[in-house]
Amino acid sequence: MQALIAQGVLILWPLVALVLYMTMSAGRATIWTLLAGYLLLPRGVAFDLPGIPAFDKSTVPSLAAFVLALATSRRGEFKWPRSKALNLLMLGFVLTPFATALTNRDFYMIGSMAFPALGFREGLSMSVGHMITLAPFVLGAGLLGNERGHRQILLALVIGALAYSIPIMLEVRLSPFFQQWVYGISDGEYFLQQMRFGGFRSMVFLGHGLLVSTLLGMALLAALGLMKMRMKLFGLPMALIAAYLAGILILNKSVGAVVLVALLAPMLLLLKRRMFLIAIAGLAMMVVTYPALRGANLLPLQGIAQATASLSAERAESFDFRLRNEELLLDRAEQRPLFGWGTFGRNRVIVVANWGGTLDVAVTDGTWIIVIGMLGWVGYVVFFGLLSYPFWRAFRLRRSAVPTASLALVAVHMYNVLDLIPNSSIQPITWLVAGAIAGLRLDTRLRRGQRDAQPVDGPSRDIHPLSKALARA
């Protein structure tokens, strides 16, 4: 019965989205269709039809948002991104799967496991999947590429994290149970990974405690940005809300998430606009070149491992486990360097054990190694090129009056992109944020180099999002 509820919720989500688009502006409804879908829809439920991408908690909200946003937006409200470089990256992302399929037309077996050949049909299916993936990016660039849109995204992240904080605290105390309780779907596959420091990490409906921490980290940076703008939420100062979210993040026991916030929060709060954007551009360059540096053994990984061991033997073991798996997967990727191995698990490291069994011996954690293994270096360039283009766009505007809301959203996006190195936390909301920054359009009334230390509407604004949503719809 509960499984039927999970499927029913997924089927009915486009109707929920329709209600949002009927009561809100297209931009705000897009944010909540994607974010609420990510937070509330069940993980592990999908309608997987042959030849097309599966309809799950990522694809259903993305498709619903794309169709409804284009159908309900006012004339001139949606603006397709005009950058030639950005359009070429999007075109490359959509077409790369065909090259991957054409270079993987060989059927092979390893032990008892068979790996089918790829063809035009598989290339088309992957390409359609990439188009659905890009839908939030295009909507972000077309509808939310301004200061108001950026502020709406920041507020939505904070409100979503605040709403999630209650089930998070319950699961931290009692163990992850909401997915099983509400939808009847077990998260046992990752349950043991949520046991940390004598307690638990929360999963709620996201599938892993690391994804919950990523949400909290992004929301915390959003709250700090809104605090810098002297905004309030429900009458509460943003400093208090940020402190609360920081406490929830620490309770969720993800060291990496805390480290990323500790890196980016001082940059956002203390650096001047121009220095902040320069520093962010430097971090973006490090992310883009990480696989090349990693493959050439130019990173001080042993030193990092030793430093980690001095802090925690458990964390050092986890770090070493990641490095060993990355080595195996990089060796596999080098056999098809340009366009990768494609789907059907062809990028996996499969061996035949001495006792005759066939084993998958590598674990794929980071998004970067997954992309290289499946789409090769060409796919990696277009994939992370799209995610990094927003930093280049912001960097080009470093001498202009970039709003504080936009700077905060850049910090939020950098958090998520940095997290893609150790983890696989790419979600529709990631693409929405990336698109909103990539399509950034400054108010022509702002003078070159003008600062915006004070909020546009005056000091200490108090935002009640529900009333604002109805007022601006």
Image: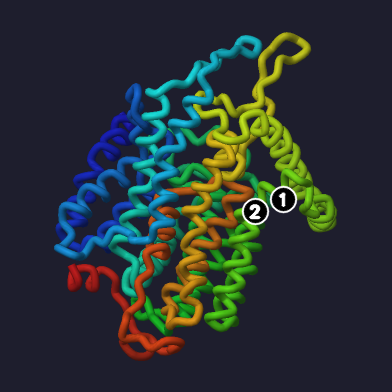
Q: Nearer the viewer, residue 312 or 284?
A: 284
Instruction: Indicate which disc residue 293 carries.
Output: 1
The residue sitting at 62% across, 50% down in the picture is 421
> For the residue marked with disc 2, what is the amino acid?
Thr
Tag 2 near tag 1, CB within 8 Å:
yes
Instruction: Indicate which disc residue 306 carries.
Output: none
As helix, strand or loop, the secondary structure at mark 2 comes to helix
The residue sitting at 49% across, 81% down in the picture is 399
Residue to which mark 2 is pinned: 289
Q: Which residue lies furthest to the front in this view?
A: 84
The local crowd at label 1, few if under 14, some if 14 to 19, many if 20 or more residues have their Cα within 10 Å, is few
User: Measured from the top left, where is residue 242 in percent x and y?
Assistant: 50, 73
User: Measured from the top left, where is residue 446 in percent x and y?
Assistant: 35, 86
User: Measured from the top left, where is residue 39 in percent x and y?
Assistant: 39, 51
State whether residue 181 appears in this view. no
Task: Classify residue 63 as left or right of residue 394.
Answer: left
> For the residue marked with disc 1, what is the amino acid?
Leu
